[in-house]
Amino acid sequence: MAGAIPTFDVRFEQVRRLPDLVWVQPEPAAPFTELTTAVAARWPSHLPYDGAFDIVIPHLTLVGSDIADLEAVEALARRSTPFARRAQRLELWCQDGAGRWRTRWRMPFGVRP
C-alpha cells in the first residue's frame, strides 16, 4: 500500500486547539485524508480512533492532556510555526496500557518525485 505512494511535501502553519488538545494542521491535508481512507478500507476492523469519529481531521498532535498548560503549549507552537517537511512513510501509532503513544510499524513510501 505505502510502497505505491510517492513522497510529498507538507507544510504546518496553523496551530489549532480543542479543550484538551493542541495540534497543527497540515497543508495540503488531502494526502492525509486519502491515506486514512485507504487504511480504513484495507483494515475495516481497525478504524482510526476505534471508529469514534465520523470524520478524521488530518493533524499533527502536539499535546493531548487535561492537566497540561495547553495555553503555554499553544503559544510555543505558534512561535515554532510554520515549518515544512517531506512525508516519507506511513506509520501506525498505538496507545499502550499506560496511555503512551508508540510507533507500532513504519512503511516507507515507495516512489520519490
Image (cartoon, rainbow, N blue to C red):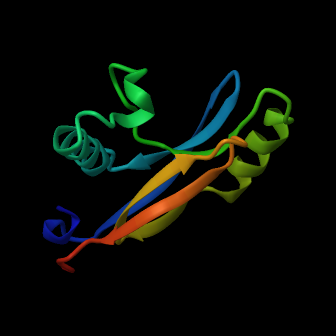
Q: Relative to 29, does residue 1 appear above or below in the rendering?
A: below
**x 23%, y 34%: residue:** 44
Q: The C terminus is located in which quarter?
A: bottom left
Considering every residue shown, the one lying at the far left of the view is 4
Q: Position of residue 81 (x, y in %)?
A: 62, 56
What is the number of callouts on the image? 0
Q: Relative to 25, does residue 67 appear above or below in the rendering?
A: above
Considering every residue shown, the one lying at the far front of the view is 97
Res 19 quadrant in image: top right
**Between 69 and 37, which is closer to the camera in this rendering?**
37
Q: Position of residue 108 (x, y in %)?
A: 31, 73
Q: The N terminus is located in which quarter?
A: bottom left
**x 66%, y 32%: residue:** 21
**x 48%, y 65%: residue:** 84
Q: Position of residue 104 (x, y in %)?
A: 48, 60
Res 111 quadrant in image: bottom left
Side of 40 relative to 103 (left or right): left
Side of 30 relative to 87 (left or right): left
